[in-house]
Amino acid sequence: QVQLVESGGGLVQPGGSLRLSCAASGSIFSINAMGWYRQAPGKQLELVAAITSGGNINYADSVKGRFTISRDNAKNTVYLQMNSLKPEDTAVYYCNADLGPSSDDYWGQGTQVTVSS
């Protein structure tokens, strides 16, 4: 069994910063990629950022230059540093992990990020 535990969400003013963390634990053979998705009210789930085991990184155009994804392989943890936050960044943020030779997909429980004055 694999668990993804997220932390770091909250309420922040426009222009502020937050750092999300997601730690994977359990029966992990290998991590192919980890990433962050978000879903705002009334909108579809969208990819925010992802990082592969080889270090390849992909960002949504809307967060390029403001968000940074990183990994600590020793801790099986992925981070999302979010700077210059905007009200449109308000959403539930979900951690995702692509694990093992079968590319099994796992999701965290979600953490709320609210950007408001």
Image (spheres, rainbow, N blue to C red):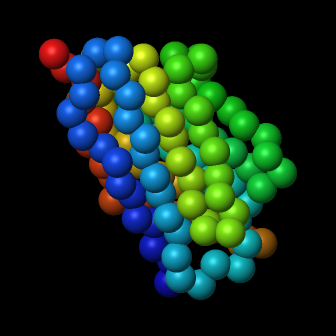
Q: Residue furthest front?
A: 16
Question: With 115 as the anchor, is 44 left or right in this view?
Answer: right
Number of numbered callouts drawn: 0
Quadrant of the image for the C terminus?
top left
Position of residue 61 in the picture relative to residue 9 (left or right): right
Res 109 → quadrant: bottom left
Residue furthest toward the right?
54
Q: Quadrant of residue 59?
A: top right
Where residue 30 appears, x then y in whole percent?
73, 72
Query: Which one is nearer the viewer's eye here, 61 or 20?
Result: 20
Q: Is residue 59 above or below residue 2?
A: above
Q: Is residue 56 visible?
A: yes
Q: Residue at x 74, y 50 (%)?
A: 52
Q: Please identify the residue farthest to the left as the structure is shown.
A: 117
Q: In the drawing, does residue 117 fall left or right of residue 88?
A: left
Percent across and percent down for residue 112 are: 26, 42
**Along the line of sight, the residue nearer the viewer: 14 or 87:** 14
Residue beneath the point at 42% across and 17% down: 84
Q: Answer yes or no: is residue 103 visible.
A: no
Q: Is residue 48 above or below residue 53?
A: above
**Residue 41 lies in quadrant:** top left
Q: Residue at x 69, y 63 (%)?
A: 73
Closer to us: 32 or 45: 32
Q: Looking at the picture, how far across and down is residue 39, in whole percent?
A: 35, 35
